[in-house]
Amino acid sequence: MSAATRRPAGAFALVAVLVGALAAVVLGFLTFGAQASVAPDHVPVAVSAPPPLQGLAHQVASHGGTQLDWRVADPAEARNLLADKEVYGVLELRPGPAATVVLSGAVNPAGTQVAQQVLAGAAQALPGEPRLEMLQPASAAGRIVPLAASALAWLGSLVAGAVLVRLSAGRRVSVPVRLAQVLGSGVLVTGVLVGFAALWDSTLPLTWDVLGFLFLTVTAFAALQAGLLRLLGLRALAILAPLYLVAPAVAGQVPELLNPAYRALLWSWTPFRFSTEGLRSLLQGAPAAPDVTTGVWVLTGLLVVGLALALWPTRSRRELPQPAERPVEVAAG
């Protein structure tokens, strides 16, 4: 084998090694890096007390350093903060022998777990054995389904869009076909998600609100992916496929537990957190929670943008008129 033949093979090997290293960097950043760097930073919690115990409430709130962001409120206001997910837990001080730790199943489980540990530790310093009150308790499936549904909605619609691009290679895909793929993914993938939810926990409230939110999530994801696949072809998978990894690694956490870099670069814009938290509130009977309205607006925006990219008609190339052929004059001989 000549040296000229060996050089390209060596260059290909170098490119392959570099691409593999880059893939490891991207995957490590999107997955294990977010989990390995988890640490509490100004986690919002509240302490409530009637007027006679306000001094004690402020004394409790003076502890925790930068890891906690205490809010002192009266009991009704503190529970409203919990319902709006502005805090992850409440420590209620009452005239009596024990304090009460109040949590909610509609709050992200990661935030609830940290709040429970923090508030239980603070309550241990007070007289009596602290009590635990869980509002809108969530089952194991109720805690898992919101994040799982978001991830599977993204993956299912992505596979459908990629298969359509692959099967139609070299042929023009019409607007009705693209629209059918988006709506078909919305119907079928939503049906799959509802089936899993019913299988995992038959007591989950699969109301029309939940079904509509799931359908909006799937169709928004499918439309956005269809638009990018139309513009970039299968090369769009290099962008869309790694985003699937963001769901469990980043969207499953609360921002106060993420490293500031992950919070700014990934959590701040990932669509999975809007679908996950909105669905969690609906499943736990909290449709008035602000994240439901926010999720609807964000997903609707993704749907509109995605449909515009996927369905906007392209300007067809008109055939240029061919110049008329001049008759060949034959000279008379």
Image: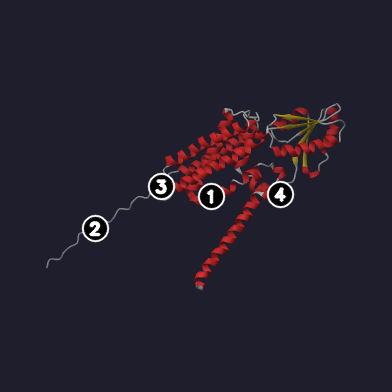
Residue 325 badge: 2
Q: Report x, y in % for residue 5.
A: 50, 70
The residues tagged by marks 1 and 2 sit, at their Cα atoms, a distance apart of 49 Å
Q: Mark 4 or mark 2, which has the lower sequence index?
A: 4
Q: Secondary structure at mark 1?
A: helix
Residue 36 badge: 4
Q: Report x, y in % for residue 48.
A: 79, 31
The residues tagged by marks 1 and 3 sit, at their Cα atoms, a distance apart of 20 Å
Q: Which residue is mark 1?
A: 237
The residues tagged by marks 1 and 4 sit, at their Cα atoms, a distance apart of 26 Å
The residues tagged by marks 2 and 3 sit, at their Cα atoms, a distance apart of 33 Å
Residue furthest to the bottom: 2
Front position among marks 4 and 3: 4
Task: Pick the residue in front: 57 or 271.
Answer: 271
Residue furthest to the top: 96
Q: Report x, y in % for residue 225.
A: 52, 44
The reply to whether residue 44 is in sight is no
Q: Secondary structure at mark 4?
A: helix
Q: Mark 4 or mark 3, which has the lower sequence index?
A: 4
Q: Quadrant of residue 180?
A: top left
Q: Mark 1 or mark 2, which has the lower sequence index?
A: 1
Q: Mark 2 or mark 3, which has the lower sequence index?
A: 3
